Image (spheres, rainbow, N blue to C red):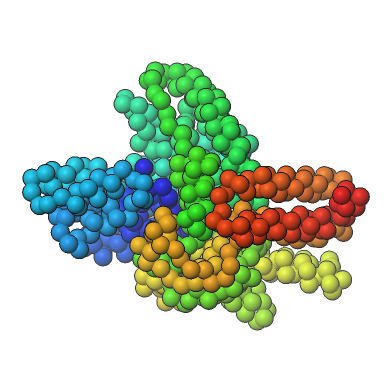
Amino acid sequence: MTHTFHIPVLGLGYSIDTPLKVAKYGISSVLSIVDDELTERMRKFHSEANHMDYVVIKKEEEDSRAKRITAYLNLIHLLVNEQFTRLRQEAFTTGADIHQYFEFLPENSILKSRYNLMMELEEGAEKALRQQELRAQMRAGNIDVNIMSKVDKANYTAGKENLGNDYTDALAAMRGFANSKLTSSVVISAGLNPRLYTYMENCSDFYPAEDGQLKKKIILKVSDFRSALIQAKMLAKKGLWVTEFRIESGLNCGGHAFATEGLLLGPILEEFKLKRLELRNELVTIHQAALCAKGISLTINPTLKFTAQGGIGTAGENAFLLNYYQLDATGWGSPFLLVPEVTNVDEKTLEALITAQQDDFYVSDSSPLGVLFNNFKNSTIEEQRLQRIEKGRPGSPCTKKFLSTNTEFTELPICTASREYQRLKIKQLEATEPDPAIFAERFAAITEKVCLCEGLCASAYLKNDLLRPRENKAVSICPGPNLAYFSRSYSLKEMISHIYGRETISFKINRPNLFINELHLYVDYLKKDLNAQLHDLNAKKTKYFEKFREELFKGINYYRELIPELKLQTDIATQEIHQQLLKAEEKLKQITKVLDPEKAML
């Protein structure tokens, strides 16, 4: 691995062409293939920008979703290869871009050490030889793709006939990736989708070639050990090998947030650390048996990597995660929203992010998926949502329908953020709920949903001047709460230097340790959830909250014991973490008194 960090998927449009900006430097990144309309428009944009022929793939064409995704990924693959080839062929003259490739590398990189030795040599045959050796060892970053397993609606013909399972959104997107020329990974997120896994079993590129190598690899984004084991075993039984577990904080991340039942990142990583060999051995046994059953008799030694992401903010935290938990890499997502040369953030949204305060970042119920969503109060889509409510026309026109899954009022599924659904739901509420307070609460819940299909693409269209006349320009953005501490926009060089500790980015306010940040997010989440359920706190819900609370207490004790391992620079920093843990513990006791007053007072 060239770098020890990657850039995770950022919304739909924010990282849609990030590989074109970082892959030539050996940096891996992830782009979303949820929206085939976005990939098609970006294919046209980049084809024209590079003076290449472009032939439209119309929505009406058979299997157009898969074909559009394949065509876009093939274009990105071609352009990155051209960029990388040009870079690798550059002479090592002063100011040449090839120097950036090596200077970006982490300080402990063997390749960087060899580059530094080469730079110390006088011009001559030996230096030229060393330069050729360096060129031979250069590798482009991966062009990985993300599929949210929950975004898998059925699709229909114009005559409302179901096209069948092979044409659902997730399966068509997977086909688009499988048919592409990429040699990279698909990151599967948002949980289990057996139908998708069954489809992948028929994709030949996920199986080892004669040399034992995989052309297409599988990465699972998971939030705990149990879910990782269940999903990986299910895939292994089909002969499909998971090459990486991408462990993400449940709440201290961007995008959709999948809160655990009180399990915190530190204890989760500890479990992976302790059980990684056991996990690998179990999966290898299952995988080899499945390959044999399919008549694949290759003797292979598959790799299995462990990475973590969500809320990392300093070089010290980055190094600690890599070293203490024996990780292969980390993911840095939201901070790259402040790096204009890497992601598609329009000027207005960028300025709003830079000047934002902590409480401008919050977890919401705005996603039509029914999953918690990291939201930003100062986004233009939030302004638009409130304006539409004020005008008596809540909801959004639904044009893309990727999140159309509700059949409460209609035969064909519609989206809960759509104007159609919200009108029908509010009408039902008006007829059944006479209490003004309850009505207001439920009205707010209905109208909180926003159109992510358009909102998460709008910034990419605005930045690249691709917005069509009368097209919605309201931007939805989903940064993690960690972004509140960053104070300005940065260059790619500045951000990489910060990650590797060559220089330090100054935060706008004091920033607690990443584990402490996540802990407080979970305590606040529990408080909010518990308060919302107090009027209907049955035995099942009480048991859930008790388990949640106990896991948080375990997490606090774990972090107390971990403090010496953190190797903090000052006694003040150590004392601050102790105080933060005590504060969280006291807060947790107070908010859960309702569950067991006597136990909470202990």
Name which residue lies at 12% across and 52% down. Answer: 122
Task: Name the one closer to the observer, 520 or 244.
Answer: 520
Provide residue 494's location: percent of width, then percent of height: 38, 64
List x then y, in percent, for residue 323.
49, 43
Query: Whole-percent x and y of residue 224?
Result: 61, 42
Image quadrant in which the N terminus is located: top left
Considering every residue shown, the one lying at the far left of the view is 124
Give the image location of residue 598, x and y in percent: 91, 50
Q: Nearer the viewer, residue 368 or 576?
A: 576
Picture layout, residue 562 above or below residue 204: below
Image quadrant of residue 592? bottom right
**Can residue 120 be seen from the camera position used here?**
yes
Residue under the point 41% across and 54% down: 500
Label count reads 0
Q: Say if 342 sits above or below 221 in the image.
A: below
Which residue is at the far right? 598
Q: Is residue 406 visible?
A: no
Q: Taking 55 as reference, is 62 left or right?
A: right
Q: Is residue 136 left or right of residue 446?
A: left
Residue 377 relative to residue 425: left or right: left
State the residue lying farthest toward the bottom: 391
Residue at x 56% of width, y 74% of height: 356
- Residue 355 lies, with reference to residue 33, above or below; the image says below
Residue at horizontal 58 percent and vertical 33 percent from the top? 274
In the picture as drawn, the residue positioned furthest to the front comes out as 571
